[in-house]
Every structure is written in structure tokens, then in C-alpha cells.
Image (tube, rainbow, N blue to C red):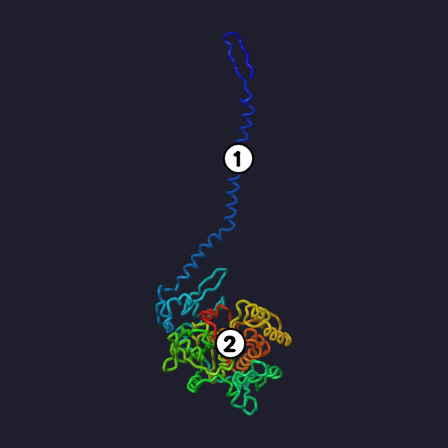
Amino acid sequence: MSSSIFNNNSISISVSDDDPDEQGRMRVRVRRKRKKHGDQRGQTECTQLLIRWFVKYWILLVFLPAAALLIFEATRIGKKPGLAVNSGVNEMKKPGSLGNKEPISKVKELSNLNRLDPTTHVVGGVRERESMNEWQCFWNLSGCLKLLPAEELEHVELPLTEESSSNLVKRLVYLSDQGTPYGAGDSTDSWQRINDTRFNLFTGHQTMDEREKSFKVNETAVIHCGFYSENGGFKISDEDKSYMQSCKVAVSTCAFGGGDDLYQPIGMSEASLKKVCYVAFWDEITLAAQELQGNKIGDDGFIGKWRIVIVKNLPFVDQRLNGKIPKMLPHRLFPHAKYSIWVDSKSQIRRDPLGVIEALLLRTNSVLAISEHGARSSVYDEAKAVVRKHKATPEEVEVQITQYRKDGLPADKRFNGRKALNEASVIVREHTNLTNMLMCLWFNEVVRFTSRDQLSFPYVLWRLKVVKNINTFPVCTRKDLVNSMGHIRKAKPLTN
């Protein structure tokens, strides 16, 4: 620091390097101005970005809350707290009283039981519930089941006349041991294997040559179709046989080996209660298991709406294979029935049978209706899934698939414009010579190869190229048809 002195009146002025000069002050001001300008520009850019984003996505901002509100409201439609629909036509019961005195702890496990409300479906990316008026009238673009209105269902008349003589198969002959040495004698076990196969006295022994000939459609078709020998098993009382012979329309299910519970049909019209037979096939194991739960057959042979038919001397050790008999051969069990609906034991039918037949067969001019598969489209993909999920051994699946490849079954995922793989828990069909023949051939395939009928049905349909009028309905229709509870317990196999 330096100083200057002028006489006595002089003033001392200090000059320091710490004092800012004019130029320094300007630099500071400039820097502050630039910083302030930068903040404003950042805010402006952020505002413009938000505006552009809002302009671009404003539809989504409005749509998402609306969709969430719609779904929330849909879950409340048609519900009454504390009530569950009973198996009758218009009855209601409280949870925990499900007709068979189910404990309250099972209510959560059987949450689908007695559900009559419409199923939902996706439209434009949004899951919506069917409106009640549309749901009960006609087919729409969603493809789900549309029954006639309730007042029309009461007056539905199904054609029960004999099939036309112009059909391709005019006469169907089932092979049996009568007049042949096979099956003779009274010491042969009903589930005896023949040549290390699952063929036995119930099925007869179908050779590979007979198998090949069976797929040829002639005016008179001679085929194996179970019930080959009187000693073959699957014995039913004369009283039950008489009841089944009186049926014109039949809804059937089965539970062998004590596997599943019995679910009462719901959603029926008064007309169906009068015109439709509801038959559940049990063996003695299931009968004992159900009686332990307090489900006893009445003096009239019924439990609720179901006529219980007890089957003795089942022909197969494998209970899955025993279950294929009522599933695939209802025309043998209900000889005078014109229509039948099969429902797996894991499901509860929830739609009026007469309405179902009218919607899936008559309205579509079809002779058989079956669901498309929900996950896969190819038999060969299904074979891999069966092995992966341990539904059958790799060896037996390989034998079946090798034979199908040899026969030329294509790997296409579409067949006749439909999905090439089906899910067979629900089968609706008219009993004609051609559909009866198809079901017999299907049964023979599950006996010869694996019990996984989803592998063999597309093959049989492909071989019988004359069967065109098959209604392969979408998965949402199947969900409208039945409430699915899944298998409750594993069936006990028979022991030799």
C-alpha cells in the first residue's frame, strides 16, 4: 500500500488491490445476468417439454383413470354381499352353505362355485364385462357364448328325428366277441392286457391293420368301440340302464377313484329340468369318499339334480382311461339320446343345456362343438408340453408322435381355418353315425397310445376329412359354459 502528503491539510488516500475497479464490477454484473438468464431459459424449456408431452399423451391421461374406474365398477355389478347362487333355478344361499354342507374354509378354495355372472373379455385393450342384454341374446365380435333370452329358452324344441339317409355313414357296426373265440371263458380278468398293450376284454384287440381300415368312411362302418365283451367290465345296474335308455338329451360327468366332488348344475331353465338327463358316473371308491363327506344318494338315485350311476368292475387300472368311456362313448351309454354335453369333473356347468345346444350346434349348423386350446396350437407343441409337465412318459409320447409323423400329420397350427389344437373339458355334440364313429376312433387312440386325449383328437379329425361342420369355439365361450374349480384331489388307481 502507498500514500501521499500535502502540507497540514493534506488528505491521505489509501489504494488497495482488494478494492474492485469499474471493470471488475462490470464483470461480476455480467456473470450474474448470464446466470439469471440461464435459469429462465431452463424453466422455459421444461415448460415447453411438459406442454409437448401433454399434447402428445393427453388421451392416455384421460383413458387410464377411466379404464380403472370401469374395471372397478365392473367387479361390483351383479353382486350382493353375503350371498351365493345356489344350484336351483332362482335360489340363493349364504356362503358356507353350498348344498353339500361344505365347511367355510372351503369357500375361498371354491371361489368359482355357483358363479352365474357374465365373464369378462378384452375389447380394444380394455377388459370389459358383457352387458346383460347382449350377453343373453346373440353372438358378437368377442365370440363368447350368447344364449337365447330366458323366455325363449323355455320354448326351445330340439330336432329329435333320425338323421338323413343321405349321410356318408348309414350304418355303424360295433365289433364284439359274439361269434368269435376272443373273450370266451369265465376266468379272464377284465383288465388283462393283450400283447402288452392296454387293449383288453372291454376294448377288443385292434390290430394296426384294423386301425388303418377304421379311418375309411363307408356306408357301413365296422369298428371297435368299447364294450367288446360281456366279461369286459364297466358294469351298470339294470335300473340305471333303463333310466339312461330313456334320455333324449344327456349332460354327463364322472369321478372315478374318489378324485373330485360333485358340482350341481346351475343356470337351467324349467324346460331343461324336464327334458335333460343329468348323469354322474361314480365308482365304489368315489361313492365311499362322498358318503364320508355326508353326500348320500337318495332313494330315487339322485343327489340334487344328478342321477348317480355306480359303475362296477372298471376295465382299466388307469383311472384317467376309465374316465374316457363316459367322455367319448356317450352314444353307447345313452343309446336313444340325440344330443349330449360332456363336462369334466373339475367343472360346474353354468348354462342352460338346451340353450347351449341351440347356440353351439343348431345356430352354427354344427354336429360337434369343442373348445380351442388356450395356450398352444400344434399337436407337436402339445406333446412337448405333456412331457415337460410329466403328464405322460417321454417314451409313450414318442411312440404316439412318431406314428403320427409317419402317417403324415402336418405341424400346421391351423386346420380348416380353425386352431389345430383343442381343449376337451367340454364337448357338445349331436349323436350321428359320423360323430359316433369319430368318438369311437378317438377312444381307440387313447387306449393304444397315451391317455392325453388332446394329442389324439386333432389326428382323428384330420384322418376323417369328411367331418367338416365342427364348431371350435373360443376359450371365453368355454369359460361362459362352466365354472372351473380344478381337480381337488388325485384319483386313486385301481390295483390288480
Query: Is residue 175 positioned above or below 415 on the image?
Result: below
Residue 449 sits in quarter = bottom right
Please, what is the three-letter code of the amino acid marked with disc 1?
Answer: His
Residue 320 is labelled as 2
Report x, y in % for residue 411. Answer: 61, 70
Looking at the image, which residue sits at the far top? Answer: 7
How dense is the environment of label 2, judged by Cα within 10 Å: few (below 14), some, or many (20 and up)?
A: some
Q: CA distance from mark 2 to mark 1?
A: 80 Å
Q: Work out which residue is located at the far bottom of the displayed protein and give it.
A: 179
Closer to the observer: label 2 or label 1?
Answer: 2
Quick one: 105 or 379, which is closer to the camera?
105
Q: Which mark is residue 37?
A: 1
Q: Residue at x 35, y 65 (%)?
A: 82
Q: Position of residue 14 (x, y in %)?
A: 53, 16
**Amino acid type of the residue tagged 2 in the rendering:** Arg
x and y percentages locating residue 29 in the rendered image: 53, 28
SS class, disc 1: helix
Choose the circle earlier in sequence order: 2 or 1.
1
Q: Nearer the viewer, residue 385 or 30?
A: 385
- Front-most of residues 358 and 405: 405
Q: Residue furthest front?
A: 496
Q: Secondary structure at mark 2?
A: helix
Q: Is residue 53 above or below residue 146?
A: above
